[in-house]
Amino acid sequence: MDQVLTLAAGDVGDLESPVLVVALEGWFDMAGAATRAVDELFAVEQRVIVGEIDPDPFYDFTVERPHIEVVDGALRQIRWARNEFSLWRAAGAGRDVVLLLGVEPHLAWPTYCDAVLEVVERLGCQVVVTVGSGAEAVPHSRTPMVTGSSSNVDLARRLGLSSPSYQGVTGLVGVLHPRLEAAGVASVSLRVGVPHYLANTSHPIAVDALQRHLAHVLGIADPVDLGSEIAQARAAHDDIVANDPQLAMYVAMLEREYDRRAEAMIPTADDLGAEFEAFLAGLDDTDPDPAGDDPDPDAD
């Protein structure tokens, strides 16, 4: 593990109720909504890098190509795909958050997961939260719902989450969750839908939805208001739909279905935050089986 993971665990001191939040570019990051949500929610000036996974064993560099950059007009350097662990601390936050921001690897997924588990163990992370976005049959004209799942029975019950039920091809996140479960680490998968008919455009409304749920669940300050950017994107998306009569009919159908289902989704972000706090308090007071008593191998 020392060959692929660098971690300065001894330099950060004791952590307060640490939670690991994972967001990776790739399969589970449609339109970049998940990685942007995490990167912008946790201010860079309040983060310090504590570790990194070496990219060399994990990527096909003809697919994830490195970038060459000119520094000071002369010196050129290569920027490889990075998977950095950083520690976010903010006064009054009530907990420390460890972030893993990076790029989904192409190769050696079990080894990559081993590196994540090593960080979880050495930093004492109580829960791992993965954040993702995917192309779904959702209308661009509605605030997207943030849904989630957890194989931890207690955590799923408290947060009103479903048990993992997806079957089929998966990404790194789908492999990571069963590994965490086997290691006795509670985990949650949060995801937001991006309209599949506009998957190649930006969706600040999805970014905002993820940020607000994460902020409430983790008990941290609300994110910066994206209202202006959301309005601009909505106008651009409306124009695209208006110029395609068939697409406009399809979107109207999606809106009706969205409105029908809206009342039956997961609890509010405030409710999630309160129950997440209660779950973490239970971990501090006792030593329950974090994996729950009814494991499910699917995690995304």
Image: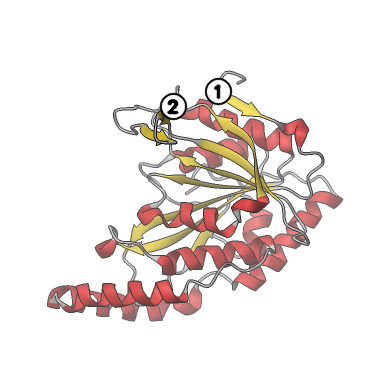
Compared with residue 298, is residue 250 higher up or lower down, i.e. above or below? Answer: below
Task: Estimate the x, y position of residue 300 in percent, counting from the top left.
Answer: 47, 49
* Side (left or right) of 254 relative to 3: left
Residue highlighted by disc 1: 4
Q: Residue at x 48, y 43 (%)?
A: 173
One can see residue 172 in this view: yes
Q: Give the vertical position of 53 relative to 36 (above or below).
A: above
For the residue pair 278 and 60, the one nearer the viewer reads as 60
Mark 2 — residue? 58
**Considering only vertical position in the picture, is 58 above or below 83?**
above
Numbered-mark total: 2
**On screen, residue 245 above or below 175:** below
Instruction: Decide: few, some or many residues near mark 1? Use Cα within 10 Å; few <14, some 14-19, many ≥20.
Output: some
In depth, the one of 297 and 117 nearer the eye is: 117
Drawn side of residue 193 relative to residue 249, left or right? right
| Relative depth, front residue between 234 and 255 | 234
Q: Are marks 1 and 2 in contact (CB under 8 Å)?
A: yes
Q: Residue 235 location in percent, x, y?
A: 30, 78
Mark 1 vs mark 2: which is more N-terminal? 1
Q: Quadrant of residue 93?
A: bottom right
Residue 58 in percent (x, y) is at 44, 27
Residue 57 coordinates in the image, percent (x, y):
45, 22
CA neighbours of label 2 inside 10 A, class few (<14), some (14 to 19), many (20+): some
Extreme residue in the front direction: 73
Residue type at numbered disc 1: Val
Spatial separation of the CA atoms under disc 1 and disc 2: 9 Å
Q: Residue at x 43, y 38 (%)?
A: 104
